[in-house]
Amino acid sequence: MAWIQKLSRASGKESVEDLMQQKKQLLVAVDRYNRIFMGSRGYGFVDWDLLNKRMHWDGAFWENLGYSQQDMDHISDSNHFLEYVHPDDREIMNNAIRGQLKNQHNGEVTCRIRRKKGGYIWAEFRTSAVRDENGWVSFMSGIAFDVTKLKQTEQALLISEARHARIIKSSNDGIWEWSADHGGFHFSNRCWEQLGYTEHDDVVNQGIDRVQAWRARMHADDGEVFDKVLRDHIRGKRPFDIEYRIKGKDDEWRWIRARGQMTYNEKGEPKRMSGTNMDITQLKNAEERVIKAKEAAEKANRAKSEFLSSMSHELRTPLNAILGFAQLFELDSNLNSDQLANVEEIKKAGHHLLQLISDVLDLAKVEAGRMSFSLEEMTPIRLLKECVVYLKPQASERDISITTEYNGLEEQTICADCVRYKQVLLNLISNAVKYNRDGGSVHITCSITKDDQFRLSVKDTGIGIPAEYQHQLFQPFNRLSAENSHIEGTGVGLVITKQLVEHMGGQLSFASQENVGSEFWVEFPIQYEQTDVSARERTEELWNSDVNEIPELEITTTKKILYVEDNPPNQRLMQQILARYPQLQLEVAGESLRGIYLARTSKPDMIILDINLPGMDGFETLDVLKKDPQTENIPVIALSANAMAHDIKRGEESGFETYLTKPIEIGKLIATCNQLLRDK
Ligand code: ADP
């Protein structure tokens, strides 16, 4: 060892006892160092004698790499040492040695050292050069130890850092960090790039002022919200996630989505907040375009509804005259049978037109999602019976039988809207009759399916639907070539039916074979609870009232009725209807002001008001009448061609006793007179 040799070189003048004493001390020291070397496990202690090219190794460094005592001879020859170093690292090792030989006192180098059985470990060498009086390095001593684990961790860290950097770069997000305790702020260049700046722009290089620069560019409306969200986040109330506008270099507004997370010190004080900025300008612009498109579509839809509503009004007004006069003719006992048949034709055509108008309106309403449903527990078979009674006369005209099979389900309930469910049944059964052959049959079956659905199926023996047309079945106005036949229809009934069923939570299906027949069925989940009696009664009441029947007028004393209507045929119609009842004296006003005047002067017992009057409409007229003490107590009813659900609702809410729609139904008018003019 170097220091023993040094000691021996310097020890010429000492006595033998001194020498013996020193030797003893030396042996104790050598023993101690040996223990330290051997106890230091993986460490290697090297003392390299450059003159003799020998490296003296202590410790278990090489032993741990699998080398034996014999191998140490080879390793200790410094001519061979580099053979144990990884070929790629030899240059590094040589440079380190050269550096130390030249001028450095201490040196450190990390390189790969070969294991005996192959493979390498990472080892760190830390050495010091020992120089003689001339400055030549005679010894190089130091330690070597295994740093493979450290190196692996370091490499894993580098890989993970590189991965994070790649992810951040590819995400195109800017990153920022704010030292809440020291006040420092870091924005990555990407944050500025998002605003159109490059790293050469002054603003990017303004140190701490960058925060002010950033804040100054923020939209005034968003700055306050930003501060509030930040304050809430620091207090732990909510995550920091905010969208704000900020002005770019080109003075255009950009949208940034900023997300971040505050960390706290052990005392719970805010320490550091890190986060990302995402440029969401394009997303926001697209969102804005979608909102605008939606608004435009809604506007168009409103325009469509308004068009349909006014079209309905325009069509109903002349229809009112046609159907009203036809009803009057029917009541005329002077008509012969041919004339009566002609009247019947007029009524049929009028009703067909009316059906078309209602279908188109229904379709538009369902499509716009504006049809209201009142879903309640109801008994489908009760409605079915009503429909069969209603359609049997039509079926027997062509000798078509309608049979039913209830399977004990008369009291079974489902949840649906009575009016709409009946509309569904009427459509399916009337189609089964319409598209049947003369003398055919319609069979209606009720059953419960395996998955607890109440199924009502309508099966006919009619013309069926050719397979090639079946996929077009639910397309509006598509009559699948029935338009070439004598069978009347509009091609929208089934579309509405399907939509109604689905809106009520049911399902409509069909199967059909050309020239054999069709089967249409609707399924609704069954209700397990007992039927609520009042609901049952309501259902019964609804369908037992026959609005087409004209009741007897129960008024015996003379009553005055004022009719405010601008359309002359409608005025004449009302005159002729009421002329049949001598108790009812009619006075007609062609516009609102005259109507109000007559109401004040003649004091009628009831007023019938049209809504679409020129100048002052029916609602305004009603308002005037109700505010005037002379007329406030006179019952006013509306009779209007505005027949959309919202018109009726508005009318009822405005203070009309009742809201009747055109075409006028004489039965309903008389029933209203009975109710409002009854002798007290
Ligand atoms: P419409 O009966 O007014 O034409 P629908 O929407 O009710 O309109 O029916 C659409 C088309 O489907 C009909 O025109 C007809 O061609 C066909 N169709 C409907 N029901 C039946 C049926 N039971 N048998 C044969 N064809 C039918």
Image: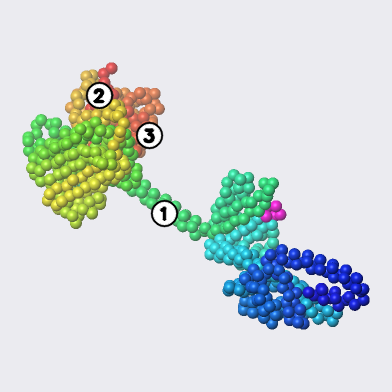
Q: Split into 4 quadrants, where in the image is the N terminus?
A: bottom right
> In the image, what residue occupies the spot 56% across and 64% down?
163
Where is residue 416, by image quadrant? Answer: top left
SS class, disc 1:
helix
Asked whether the beta carbons under mark 2 and mark 3 sit within 8 Å of each other, the answer is: no
Cα gap from disc 2 to disc 3, whole angstroms: 26 Å
- The percent coordinates of residue 13 (x first, y second) are 92, 76
**Which label number is shown at residue 620?**
3
Nearer-N-terminus badge (2/3) = 3
SS class, disc 2:
helix
> In the image, what residue occupies the spot 67% across and 79% down?
74
The residue stretch that appears in magenta: 179-183
- The percent coordinates of residue 440 (x first, y second) are 10, 43
Left or right: residue 66 compared with residue 332: right
Residue type pointed to by label 2? Asn
Which residue, given by chain and number where applicable, does mark 1 sit on? 293
Asked whether the beta carbons under mark 2 and mark 1 sit within 8 Å of each other, the answer is: no
- The percent coordinates of residue 41 (x first, y second) are 69, 65
